[in-house]
Image (spheres, rainbow, N blue to C red):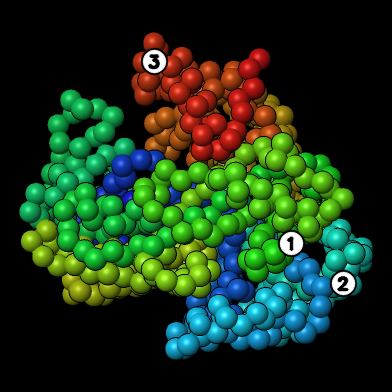
């Protein structure tokens, strides 16, 4: 392909990066530009699940379920270090309840006239019963029949090896299989490492520009560095512009002066993380997918040493990046946990952190938020600014399939043949991944001895990098086991991360590279050491560091409810 043909992708979340990877695999040069950091929107604010969308069956969205369970199987094979199988339990109280209300939800998915009126005027019980859930899970198993995960099963409450849920309220648990992507932020970084590899292999151009802004001057894209006002602007004429800025898609079109009807109507989803030991013990190794009093299904998920609970579904307006979890949402999620696990007695004080994001859903002015389709689509614009493709919808599970569709559309319109290689291409860090628990433990022991690091340091690094870890540590000259204070991460590794993983700020490191925001305790001395690393890398002036730490502590409190421990 002619190097003068270049795609400009606006947005460095999982969809934008996945499209870049597909286009590079098909020999098309790519530039990704984001006004902020990688994964700063819905990618890092999701429920962190790779799931087939069991709930979507109720709305008749069979094609999305089929695609999702297929993609789930692909990701379990291609990224075993980042995507893990997870067994879910659905608590059930009744045998036959919920069938009429579920039928109405099914009809509403096909936009049958009169169904919204019936839903609002007829007082059917919304609580899903055993018979209904068993039918849904049987259908779910059928969609996933080619996968290797266990099929669904039904158990009595109180059986050993299952979550210790409320026996006075629930009688059964219906269990089924899905998967978890604990750190999608790291998944995006891994895909970007692969983009670099592909570009080197093929001898084509790829660049990623975070904290940059784009404006259009007719068909020319003018790119400005937001962190360096004196730096000259860059210009080039893109062959196609892909608006992959998620829930900010309308704001992006407005910013580049492209006329468009409203496309996005995202809803806010909030989550909480708790290190309550009683909750983690009662949950065990499985997740719970339970119905709240309003009929919404909420996840209670094992998350390392903590528990992740979410999510809500609230219509919002304004800038999606400004949303935070409301007191009402936090209370709702805590009450949900206590309904399922009353002996835990979770309180608001047990919330270690919370986060909130806006789903990039299509604009639908009426109806329940839960009824808005989670499927994805494309909106084309061709005019004086050139060809612009805007992504609408999408979910964490189906990023690869969405990227295939977008790339196929782009390349075919340019008269190029499209061939997908991403179905079988391993994500960096998956090469030679240990196949058994004993081999895995032996590998961690070997690496701990080789680099004179504590085993928990190797475990933490492995969680971030998978098998890519050894290549990284081998590349560090005169490797020292000195750790960042308050963490198990080597200081030299953090320096490597800043140099090779597009980290510019404290937030980039804490929230989206090193994943320290999810640590039970985040210490001020940790922020001081990270700031020193940014100073050493030339990202921050020495005199700026104290003020940056203080402003970042304010940011953590506002958007995460996360306290920094002063030592």
Q: Residue at x 58, y 71 (%)?
A: 53
Q: Secondary structure at mark 3?
A: helix
Give the spatial CA distance, label 2 vs label 3: 59 Å
> Quick one: label 2 or label 3, which is nearer the N terminus?
2
Residue under label 3? 544
Indicate which label's residue lies in the foreground, 1 or 2: 2
Q: Secondary structure at mark 1?
A: strand
Q: Disc 2, disc 3: CB below 8 Å?
A: no
Q: Residue at x 55, y 45 (%)?
A: 326
Tell whether 135 sits left or right of 112.
right
Tell whether 450 sits left or right of 323.
right
Residue under label 1? 288
Give the spatial CA distance, label 1 vs label 2: 14 Å
Q: Disc 1, disc 2: CB below 8 Å?
A: no
Q: Disc 1, disc 3: CB below 8 Å?
A: no
Q: Residue at x 78, y 53 (%)?
A: 338
Q: Nearer the viewer, residue 255 or 388?
A: 255
Question: How busy is the neighbourhood of tag 2: few (under 14 within 10 Å), some, or many (20 plus)?
Answer: some
Residue under label 2? 171
Q: Residue furthest front?
A: 121
Residue 186 place in picture, x, y as percent = 52, 46
Q: Secondary structure at mark 2?
A: loop
Q: Residue at x 60, y 25 (%)?
A: 564
Residue 119 place in picture, x, y as percent = 56, 80
């Amino acid at each position: 392909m002619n190097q003068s043909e270049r795609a400009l992708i606006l947005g460095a979340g999982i969809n934008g990066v996945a499209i870049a990877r597909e286009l590079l695999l098909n020999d098309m040069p790519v530039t990704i530009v984001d006004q902020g950091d990688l994964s700063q929107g819905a990618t890092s604010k999701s429920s962190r699940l790779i799931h087939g969308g069991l709930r979507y069956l109720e709305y008749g969205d069979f094609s999305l379920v089929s695609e999702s369970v297929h993609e789930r199987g692909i990701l379990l094979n291609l990224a075993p270090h980042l995507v893990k199988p997870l067994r879910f339990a659905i608590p059930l109280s009744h045998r036959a309840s919920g069938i009429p209300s579920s039928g109405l939800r099914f009809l509403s998915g096909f936009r049958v006239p009169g169904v919204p009126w019936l839903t609002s005027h007829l007082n059917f019980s919304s609580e899903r019963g055993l018979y209904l859930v068993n039918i849904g899970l049987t259908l779910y198993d059928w969609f996933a029949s080619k996968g290797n995960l266990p099929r669904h099963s039904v158990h009595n409450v109180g059986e050993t090896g299952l979550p210790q849920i409320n026996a006075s309220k629930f009688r059964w648990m219906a269990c089924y299989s899905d998967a978890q992507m604990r750190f999608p932020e790291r998944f995006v970084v891994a895909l970007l490492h692969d983009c670099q590899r592909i570009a080197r292999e093929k001898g084509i151009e790829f660049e990623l520009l975070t904290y940059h802004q784009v404006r259009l001057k007719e068909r020319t894209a003018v790119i400005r560095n937001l962190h360096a006002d004196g730096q000259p602007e860059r210009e080039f004429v893109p062959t196609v512009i892909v608006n992959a800025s998620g829930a900010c898609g309308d704001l992006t079109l407005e910013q580049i002066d492209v006329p468009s009807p409203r496309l996005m109507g995202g809803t806010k989803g909030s989550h909480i993380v708790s290190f309550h030991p009683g909750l983690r013990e009662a949950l065990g190794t499985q997740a719970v997918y339970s119905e709240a009093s309003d009929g919404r299904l909420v996840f209670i998920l094992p998350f390392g040493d903590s528990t992740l609970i979410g999510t809500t579904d609230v219509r919002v307006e304004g800038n999606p990046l400004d949303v935070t979890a409301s007191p009402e949402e936090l209370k709702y999620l805590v009450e949900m946990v206590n309904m399922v696990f009353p002996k835990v007695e979770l309180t608001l004080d047990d919330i270690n952190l919370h986060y909130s994001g806006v789903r990039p859903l299509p604009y639908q002015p009426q109806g329940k938020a839960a009824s808005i389709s989670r499927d994805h689509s494309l909106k084309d614009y061709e005019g004086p600014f050139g060809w612009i493709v805007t992504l609408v919808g999408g979910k964490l599970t189906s990023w690869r399939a969405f990227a295939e569709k977008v790339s196929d559309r782009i390349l075919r319109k340019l008269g190029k043949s499209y061939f997908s290689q991403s179905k079988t291409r391993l994500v960096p860090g998956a090469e030679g991944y240990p196949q058994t628990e004993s081999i895995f433990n032996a590998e961690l022991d070997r690496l701990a001895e080789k680099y004179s690091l504590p085993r928990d340091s190797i475990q933490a690094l492995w969680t971030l990098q998978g098998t890519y870890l050894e290549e990284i540590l081998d590349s560090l000259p005169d490797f020292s086991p000195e750790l960042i204070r308050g963490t198990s991460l080597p200081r030299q590794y953090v320096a490597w991360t800043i140099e090779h993983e597009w980290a510019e700020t404290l937030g980039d490191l804490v929230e989206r590279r090193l994943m320290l925001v999810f640590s039970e305790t985040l210490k001020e001395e940790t922020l001081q050491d990270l700031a020193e690393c940014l100073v050493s890398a030339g990202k921050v002036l020495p005199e700026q560091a104290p003020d940056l730490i203080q402003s970042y502590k304010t940011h953590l409190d506002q958007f995460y409810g996360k306290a920094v421990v002063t030592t």
